[in-house]
């Protein structure tokens, strides 16, 4: 059971010198919570996603420990230190590969487990994963570490999109027009209702309960596309009892939002970050912070966040939760689109201003396909040549904060590499941020000209 004194927001802000956190970024936890339709398995994509773990560096303090499958590029660690970030002690499991989930690697390494057992003897040492599954519970059990968060079964429950809608309804929040469907036949009926009756939705989104990172979400605009999708969903449903889907209208929006909650073991709920999300269809590609919204909307988001946090605590949840919301084109706030009972990519950039100071920040996420191996020093040199590299003196520029994803996966023997670039575009005003963003997009297109394709063509 977690010590009652643990409060993550305080430890990352006002109490940075206190306690010791052992971090692990176990992305892909959904596979352990529930059976999820994986779709087409892409080994290269899995390799890239696993290397996203490095973004945990943005949250670490000097006294902390971070478990990674590979050491980050030393030039990345040096650059982050120069900017004022704290680099923790990094622990790497023996015989780590690029595809095995990180917690499985930890459990296979007796020497690392012994090291963690030694660290667990500290009175103020906590184990803080991206998400808690049976694997992280097993690590805590074998080492004696204090797990900072609620049990895996509670985490799984909170991540159910259908349950998220139920939470919203119980709290009296506005919800998207739609319905929970128990068969593919019901999906067809609800699709016809949403597209054939006021407000006449042009598109409908179909959600599997436990999808993540855009998986298990299907945006459908016409009956033919629906028919093909339902054939696939029906095949999956035959192998799984009690299949359910959430079918909702796709609203015209003023803004997609994400807000981060921390629910303490005592039940105190804090909203510690509100951002405007950039989405391509239903897939996250970046965020704007702080969110530029009507103060009335921001106040209401904070109020709803506290209500959600108290609700989650009543069902036994504590820890970080990321909530997605929308502001519709008529100005209506729908406070819960989904709740992630875990960290999200947005969590890791939520405290960036404690290091860089107050600024306008646009986070961007780009797919890369290059005909050369990109390393961190290379991208720094390219940014510097273009006058884009973040400079602490001027407090503006582009900060690339993950090294391991840049050329994470060789696509073929022909020297083509697939990767991702995670960057923060920082300036004093949004006009300058937008200018830098345009120049960064131009640079990404130049980098990704292998085989004469643009970035967008390659990612489609």
Image (cartoon, helix red, strand yellow):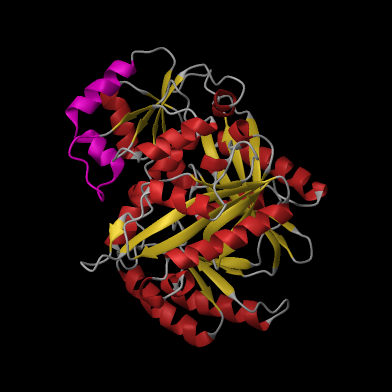
- Queried whether the magenta region covers residue 65, the answer comes back as no
Residue 50: x and y, percent? 34, 49
- Name the one closer to the observer, 132 or 80: 80
- Name the one closer to the observer, 240 or 109: 109
Q: Pick out the residue farthest to the front.
A: 385
Report whether residue 272 is seen.
Answer: yes
Residue 300: x and y, percent? 76, 46
Taking the spot 66% from the left edge, 42% from the top edge, the residue there is 305
- Name the one closer to the observer, 328 or 69: 69
Q: Left or right of 129: which side holds 335?
A: right
- Name the one closer to the observer, 412 or 436: 436
Q: Left or right of 289: which side holds 214?
A: left
Report whether residue 29 is seen.
Answer: no
- Queried whether the magenta region covers residue 115, the answer comes back as yes
Taking 294 as reference, is 113 above or below it?
Answer: above
Residue 282: x and y, percent? 54, 64
Give the magenta-colored segment's residue range: 93-120
Taking the spot 51% from the left edge, 41% from the top edge, the residue there is 348
Taking the spot 48% from the left edge, 63% from the top edge, the residue there is 444
């Amino acid at each position: 059971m977690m010590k009652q004194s643990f409060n993550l927001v305080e430890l990352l802000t006002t109490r940075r010198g206190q306690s010791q956190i052992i971090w692990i970024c176990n992305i892909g936890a959904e596979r352990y919570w529930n059976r999820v339709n994986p779709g087409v398995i892409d080994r290269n994509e899995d390799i890239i996603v696993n290397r996203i773990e490095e973004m945990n560096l943005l949250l670490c303090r000097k006294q902390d420990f971070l478990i990674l499958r590979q050491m980050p590029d030393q030039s990345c660690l040096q650059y982050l230190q120069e900017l004022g970030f704290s680099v923790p002690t990094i622990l790497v499991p023996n015989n780590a590969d690029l595809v095995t989930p990180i917690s499985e690697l930890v459990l296979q390494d007796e020497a690392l487990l012994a090291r963690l057992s030694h660290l667990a003897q500290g009175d103020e040492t906590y184990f803080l994963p991206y998400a808690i599954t049976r694997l992280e519970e097993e690590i805590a059990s074998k080492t004696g570490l204090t797990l900072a968060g609620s049990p895996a079964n509670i985490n799984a429950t909170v991540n159910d999109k259908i349950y998220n809608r139920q939470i919203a309804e119980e709290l009296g929040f506005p919800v998207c027009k739609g319905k929970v469907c128990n068969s593919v036949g019901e999906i067809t009926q609800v699709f016809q209702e949403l597209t054939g009756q006021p407000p006449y939705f042009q598109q409908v989104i179909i959600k599997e309960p436990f999808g993540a990172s855009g998986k298990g979400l299907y945006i459908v605009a016409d009956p033919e596309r629906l028919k093909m999708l339902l054939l696939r969903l029906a095949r999956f449903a035959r192998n799984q009892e009690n299949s359910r889907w959430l079918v909702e209208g796709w609203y015209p929006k003023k803004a997609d939002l994400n807000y981060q909650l921390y629910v303490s073991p005592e039940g105190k709920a804090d909203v510690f970050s509100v951002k405007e999300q950039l989405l391509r269809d239903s897939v996250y590609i970046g965020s704007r912070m702080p969110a530029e919204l009507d103060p009335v909307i921001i106040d209401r988001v904070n109020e709803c966040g506290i209500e959600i946090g108290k609700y989650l605590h009543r069902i036994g949840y504590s820890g970080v939760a990321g909530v997605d919301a929308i502001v519709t084109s008529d100005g209506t706030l729908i406070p819960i689109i989904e709740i992630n009972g875990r960290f999200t990519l947005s969590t890791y950039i939520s405290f960036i201003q404690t290091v860089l100071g107050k600024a306008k920040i646009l986070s961007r996420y780009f797919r890369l396909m290059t005909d050369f191996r990109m390393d961190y020093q290379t991208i720094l040199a390219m940014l510097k040549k273009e006058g884009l590299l973040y400079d602490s003196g001027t407090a503006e520029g582009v900060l690339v904060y993950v090294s391991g994803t840049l050329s994470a996966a060789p696509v073929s023997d022909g020297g083509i590499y697939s990767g991702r670039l995670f960057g923060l575009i920082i300036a004093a005003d949004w006009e300058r941020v937008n200018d830098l963003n345009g120049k960064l997009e131009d640079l990404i297109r130049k980098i990704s000209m292998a085989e004469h394709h643009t970035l967008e063509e390659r990612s489609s």
